[in-house]
Image (cartoon, grey):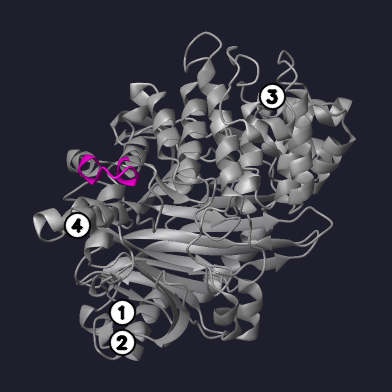
Amino acid sequence: MATTVRRTVLTLPGAPVGPENPLPPLRPLGELHQLDEHERRALPADMARQTGYGHLGSVLPARLLDGYGRERAAIDLDAIVIENDRLRATVLPGLGGRVYSLHHKPTGRELLYRNPVFQPAAFALNGAWFSGGIEWNLGATGHTTLSCAPLHAARVPAPDGGEMLRLWEWERLRDTPFQVDLWLPEGSDFLHVGVRIRNPHDRPVPVYWWSNIAVPEEARTRVLAPAEEAWHFAYEGRLRRVPVPEWEGTDRTYPLRGEHAADFFYEVPDGARRWIASLDADGHGLVQTSTDLLRGRKLFLWGAGRGGRRWQEWLTEPDTGGYAEIQAGLARTQLEHVQLEAGGEFSWLEAYGPLAAEPSAVHGRDWAAARAAAESRLETALPRADVEAAYAAWLASADTEPKESLAAGSGWGALELARGGYALPGTPFEASTLGEAQRPWLELLRAGELPEVWADAAPGASAADAGAAAGGVSERACAGVCKDPGPSLVSSAWRELLESAHPGAAVDYHLGVAQWHAGDRAQATRSWERSLRAAESPWALRCLGVAAGESGDGERAADLLLRAVGLVTAGGAGSAGGAPERVLAAFAREAVDALLARGRVADARGVLAELPERVRARGRFRLLEAQVSLAAGDAAGARALLDLGIEVADLREGDEVLSDLWSAVAARLAPESGAADPLPDHYDFRMRPVRD
């Protein structure tokens, strides 16, 4: 059977990703994989340097995706199938190019963990992410902002003359275009994947890449890699070298033998073949291997504890099998970024396929013999020399232009090509992909002016007046100032264009966001104050509120955010001239958080009372209502809401807000009941050992 590439549709029970959060993400999102200076000093020099390099203060210019819920219905997902007589790979171009399934025909085995539902959860750098399959993580530490975004996809001639699927996009955190080419050589049991990241700029850029593979997890599932040591990270801010396979009396290569979520970054010796495998009790499973540039290998496990089990249910549904993740990256750990020089590129080849080994060998107590048995079977199935040869052949065709488009990504790459004039053979960013989000920036580029989104708005109050007045919101509807100004662009090139444009409410608003991203907070504040003088918009008020909070002035932050949400609610969500619900929800959430932090319970309760019931019914706002009740001294009211059930759809990885709230409420009620009630399983998302 000749290799084919074809479109299809995958139908799953799923929850829609929903709209973007319209507020620019000015704050860091609390990435868990971080070390303090003391921890970094204890690392090898190259690792210490790379763990301190390239960290982002926010995910700008991306927007947050937090508009999803947990109510599922049948949804259709565009898919592309790559198939030969041995393997069938199903790819989701509209969801980050995720390889959803890898089916081995001769054995009838699914090699990946294939999630039976599509359930977004807040694991990506910008929010929405889903579990399962093979994902391509790049940009910065964490799951990519493209997890639930469309990529460009096209049919391209493969190195062996067959057909190949090319995926590509413009990665916006680093402004680096990338491509992922997938093909199945005729008669091969291995999916071949060629990856290239390019830096078209005249400056170095930090690069991050980890291919993340979800694999089925059972009691006898074992993960093998060519290493005798690993770097262990357990969500407590520590990275330490530990032996492999046994540490603290437990063989950690069996994911379910760990109690809590943990990362094990394997120390693969220089010169050793790069590979990692997950094998079941019978010695069957999946192996991933690559050319040497992709040096890192990792096991992530949820652990057998309550928190890990709860997260797995949350990401899929009860009574389905669990999963672990085996991964491959450019650096030894995911805490590191690697420098890509100006005008340079990184490229490598990966291969994914079935592996079958003698179970008594790969599950034996002799670790050296176990991994040797797995590597021997890999060498028989796919010799290392063949991987190198396939890489050389692919690299010669990496610039081949696509011959048939299969899916369209965003217009951001086309906009950057219009600005920078970059030559990127093989990955065309066509002008036809430019859309509404890019339109004002294209006008700035061509005419030197940004359209005034709040042109009909009346001039605003002074920044000092706005900061002093918590109430007194204008009675006018917010048809003008509540209009979404659209995404901000923050690179130095766009910042310079904004600085050259004629000042105005929208220009100064976007300029402030770009200046904030660059670390110039004082200048950003001045830009937002100018924007506010031109038009009293809730957008500039909110940015000033965030700036006040980040500088330590929580009271002024609360005042500004309260005034911002007051402007938004003045017209009423969904009414003529009113703000869309997504705008209202975004402003209200931030305002309530800021007001609670200052103990302004009455103001927080007032904001919640102004929301439509359909907004208040969302899990995030039920949580806020319970927190307000507790802050007001009504522990019984907070407990009643918890007993009814609170599902916070956008609960972030590692967030213990639900268990913390339960404990605080239970402790407050304990004198009446005699003892604090234990935390229910459905509120236990703890990824760390329980603290006293």
| Structural crowding at the residue carrying mark 4, measured as other residues with C-alpha within 10 Å and reported as few (<14), some (14–19) or many (≥20) | some
Please say if 314 is above or below 451.
below
Q: Earlier in the sequence, mark 2 or mark 3?
A: 2
Quadrant where the C terminus is found in the figure:
bottom left
Q: Earlier in the sequence, mark 3 or mark 4?
A: 3
Tell me what residue is drawn at x 52 percent, y 83 percent. Answer: 272
Q: Position of residue 616 (x, y in %)?
A: 35, 29
Q: CA distance from mark 3 to mark 4?
A: 46 Å
Q: Residue at label 3? A: 536
Q: Secondary structure under badge 2?
A: strand
Q: CA distance from mark 2 to mark 1?
A: 6 Å
Viewer-nearest of discs 3 and 4: 3
Q: Residue at label 4? A: 679
Q: Answer yes or no: do the residues labelled 3 and 1 have beta carbons within 8 Å?
A: no
Residue 307 figure quarter:
bottom left
Q: Position of residue 401 (x, y in %)?
A: 69, 42
Q: Position of residue 418 (x, y in %)?
A: 80, 35
Q: Answer yes or no: do the residues labelled 3 and 4 have beta carbons within 8 Å?
A: no
Q: Answer yes or no: do the residues labelled 2 and 3 have beta carbons within 8 Å?
A: no
Please say if 359 is above or below 131.
below
- The verdict on residue 390 being magenta is no
Q: Secondary structure under badge 3?
A: loop
Q: Residue at label 2? A: 246
Q: CA distance from mark 1 to mark 4?
A: 28 Å
> What's the amino acid at mark 1?
Arg
Q: Residue at label 1? A: 252
Q: Is residue 227 left or right of residue 642?
A: right
Residue 188 figure quarter:
bottom left
| Range of residues picked out in magenta | 629-637
Q: Is residue 51 left or right of residue 67?
A: right
> What's the amino acid at mark 4?
Leu
Is 81 or 301 nearer to us in this picture?
301
